[in-house]
């Protein structure tokens, strides 16, 4: 099964809009939303059943037993995250605690323990030979990269008759993006013709290059700044990256998304352009030995 990951260097480029269109065009039976901080692919892809939900446990959180605590203050003094405060009793702020265990190690009376903490929720939609894996990280929780890995494992755990898996990744270049990149066959980067869009595009290209993953580029809302669009195309040529095409700004796309539909469900300019990008991407992905690697 080929895995296509759709990324963007920054938020707001239209990555999820394009990912949902690809899922619809491919009639994909296996797909995932790895933007665990703010998942929204489920808003566009219709699901006929309720998801199977599983608690995700991240790093443990420290907990102080007030009956054993002798108020020596060593835990508070050694906590580099300022998560321990004292007001008659010593207590730990679970939102600030990183679960490093230093407080537990320095406590002379073993009054501190590390307790498992729910950091998010995994959701799996599996029905009629189709699987959709996603998750939601709790506010203030970390380890988003580990949760992304679990989302991908969950998607692969359900055996479906599919030759393609489409993964909607996270914006940026952080831990969730790195976890998303692991093991995929191709990365489609959705670029935006803005100053910040070009800067972040360069960063995500470098990140993908570390994995030796085949990387291709498309430009969304290209007509909002034709000058910067030409700069992105020149960048692709300079770095020998395959350019998949341009997608215009389209107010009809906004209307489609607001109605819970993909841009290929309606007759619009952006939908037609995405179909061309999709066809070119699939041809390269399934063409043996095709494409240039970043």
Image (tube, grey):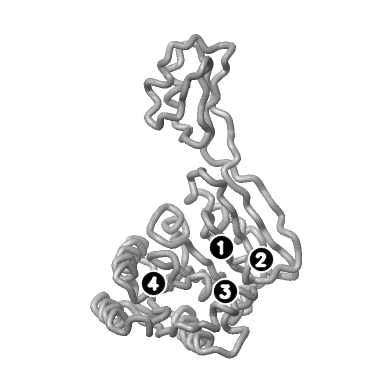
Query: Which numbered disc, 1 or 3, marks the residue that appears first in the sequence?
Result: 3
| Residue underneath mark 2 | 131
- Residue 206: quadrant of the picture: bottom left
| Residue underneath mark 4 | 214
Dot in front, 2 or 1: 1
- Residue 126: quadrant of the picture: bottom right
| 283 is higher (above) or lower (below) than 68 | below
The Cα–Cα distance between marks 2 and 4, rounded to whole angstroms, is: 25 Å
Dot in front, 2 or 4: 2
| 176 is higher (above) or lower (below) than 188 | above
Characterize the local packing of mark 2: few (<14), some (14-19) or many (20 or more) Cα atoms within 10 angstroms: many
The Cα–Cα distance between marks 4 and 1, rounded to whole angstroms, is: 20 Å
* Image quarter of the N terminus: bottom right
| Residue underneath mark 3 | 20
Q: Position of residue 218 (x, y in %)?
A: 40, 79
Secondary structure of the residue carrying numbered label 4: strand
Q: Which mark is residue 33?
A: 1
Secondary structure of the residue carrying numbered label 2: strand
Check contact, mark 3 vs mark 2: CB within 8 A: no
Check contact, mark 4 vs mark 1: CB within 8 A: no
Secondary structure of the residue carrying numbered label 1: strand
Position of 47 compared to 22: left or right?
Answer: right
Secondary structure of the residue carrying numbered label 3: helix
The Cα–Cα distance between marks 1 and 3, rounded to whole angstroms, is: 10 Å
Q: Position of residue 259 (x, y in %)?
A: 64, 75
Check contact, mark 2 vs mark 4: CB within 8 A: no
The Cα–Cα distance between marks 2 and 1, rounded to whole angstroms, is: 11 Å
Dot in front, 3 or 4: 3
| 130 is higher (above) or lower (below) than 221 | above
Choose between 150 and 253: the one closer to the eye.
Answer: 253
Query: Which numbered disc, 4 or 1, marks the residue that appears first in the sequence?
Result: 1
């Amino acid at each position: 099964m080929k895995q296509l990951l759709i990324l963007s260097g920054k938020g707001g480029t239209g990555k999820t809009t394009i990912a949902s269109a690809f899922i619809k065009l491919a009639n994909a039976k296996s797909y995932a939303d790895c933007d665990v901080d703010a998942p929204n692919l489920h808003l566009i892809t219709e699901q006929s059943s309720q998801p199977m939900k599983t608690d995700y446990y991240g790093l443990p959180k420290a907990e102080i037993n007030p009956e054993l605590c002798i108020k020596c203050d060593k835990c508070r003094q050694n906590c580099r995250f300022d998560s321990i405060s004292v007001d008659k009793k010593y207590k730990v702020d679970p939102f600030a605690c990183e679960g490093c265990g230093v407080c537990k190690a320095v406590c002379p009376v073993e009054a501190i323990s590390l307790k498992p903490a729910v950091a998010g929720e995994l959701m799996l939609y599996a029905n009629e030979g189709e699987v959709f894996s996603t998750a939601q990280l709790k506010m203030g929780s970390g380890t988003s990269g580990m949760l992304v890995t679990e989302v991908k494992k969950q998607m692969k755990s359900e055996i479906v008759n599919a030759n393609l898996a489409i993964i909607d990744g996270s914006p940026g270049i952080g831990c969730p993006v790195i976890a998303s990149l692991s093991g995929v066959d191709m990365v489609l980067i959705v670029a935006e013709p803005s100053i910040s869009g070009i800067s972040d595009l360069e960063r995500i290209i470098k990140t993908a290059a570390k994995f030796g993953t085949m990387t291709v580029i498309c430009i969304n809302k290209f007509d909002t700044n034709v000058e910067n669009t030409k700069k992105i195309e020149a960048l692709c040529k300079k770095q020998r990256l395959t350019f998949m095409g341009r997608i215009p700004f389209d107010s009809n796309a906004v209307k489609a998304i607001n109605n819970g539909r993909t841009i290929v469900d309606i007759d619009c300019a952006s939908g037609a352009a995405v179909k061309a990008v999709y066809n070119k991407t699939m041809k390269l992905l399934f063409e043996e030995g095709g494409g240039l690697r970043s």
